[in-house]
């Protein structure tokens, strides 16, 4: 889940055969109450829409093609969903997150949390200034070299 600026705010790890909508309510309950929920058609369920309506959260979720009476969609708000997609692309730039080499869930979640923190800081850019233990000084590195960089304690 991402905030309005595309920063990761909550995530959960589920088995591959579990639909994303199953974790929507627990993740929404774990974060501060949003004013609006942007999601794709996979989240078009009456139960989620009811849950959002009870908490006075506006839903910008397009209806699936199989719905007989589609819900109205705020297209201006829905256009902002690209911010969420860009956040997922930034996470997938981290090979450890994209490929899931880790066998243990806690190791994968720790790598995901590290990538999310760096994305939230806004550090992942084309060129970034940081402290590098390889060089021992504050330098600029390309995005590809960023994976080897650690932040000093």
Image: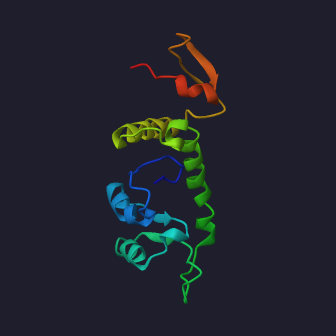
Which residue sits furthest top?
136
Left or right for 126, reference 62: right
Question: In percent of the image, x 54 and y 49: which residue is there?
Answer: 6
Left or right for 35, reference 130: left
Question: In percent of the image, x 56 and y 83: which residue is there?
Answer: 66
Q: Where is residue 89 in the image (x, y as percent from the top left)?
A: 59, 47
Q: Can residue 97 be spotted in the picture?
A: yes
Left or right for 142, reference 152: right
Q: Where is residue 79 in the image (x, y as percent from the top left)?
A: 63, 63
Q: Quadrant of residue 142?
A: top right
Residue 9 versus residue 96: which sits nearer the camera?
96
Say which quadrant the N terminus sits in. bottom left
Q: Quadrant of residue 127?
A: top right
Question: In percent of the image, x 55 and y 54: which residue is there?
Answer: 84
Question: In percent of the image, x 55 and y 78: which residue is there?
Answer: 63
Which residue sits furthest bottom?
68
Q: Quadrant of residue 117?
A: top left
Q: Where is residue 119 in the image (x, y as percent from the top left)?
A: 52, 39
Q: Can residue 35 be spotted in the picture?
A: no
Check the image and report above or below for 90 versus 85: above
Rendered image coloring scheme: rainbow
Say which quadrant the C terminus sits in. top left
Check the image and report above or below for 51 versus 90: below
Image mark count:
0
């Amino acid at each position: 889940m991402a905030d309005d600026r595309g920063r990761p705010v909550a995530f959960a790890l589920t088995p591959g055969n579990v639909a994303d909508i199953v974790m929507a309510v627990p993740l929404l309950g774990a974060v501060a109450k949003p004013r609006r929920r942007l999601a794709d058609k996979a989240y078009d369920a009456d139960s989620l829409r009811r849950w959002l309506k009870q908490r006075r959260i506006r839903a910008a979720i397009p209806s699936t093609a199989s719905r007989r009476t589609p819900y109205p969609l705020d297209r201006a708000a829905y256009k902002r969903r690209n911010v969420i997609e860009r956040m997922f692309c930034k996470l997938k730039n981290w090979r450890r997150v994209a490929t899931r080499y880790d066998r243990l869930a806690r190791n994968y979640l720790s790598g995901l949390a590290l990538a999310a923190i760096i994305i939230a800081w806004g550090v992942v850019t084309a060129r970034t200034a940081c402290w590098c233990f390889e060089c021992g000084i504050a330098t600029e590195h390309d995005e590809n070299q960023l994976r080897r960089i650690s932040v000093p304690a």
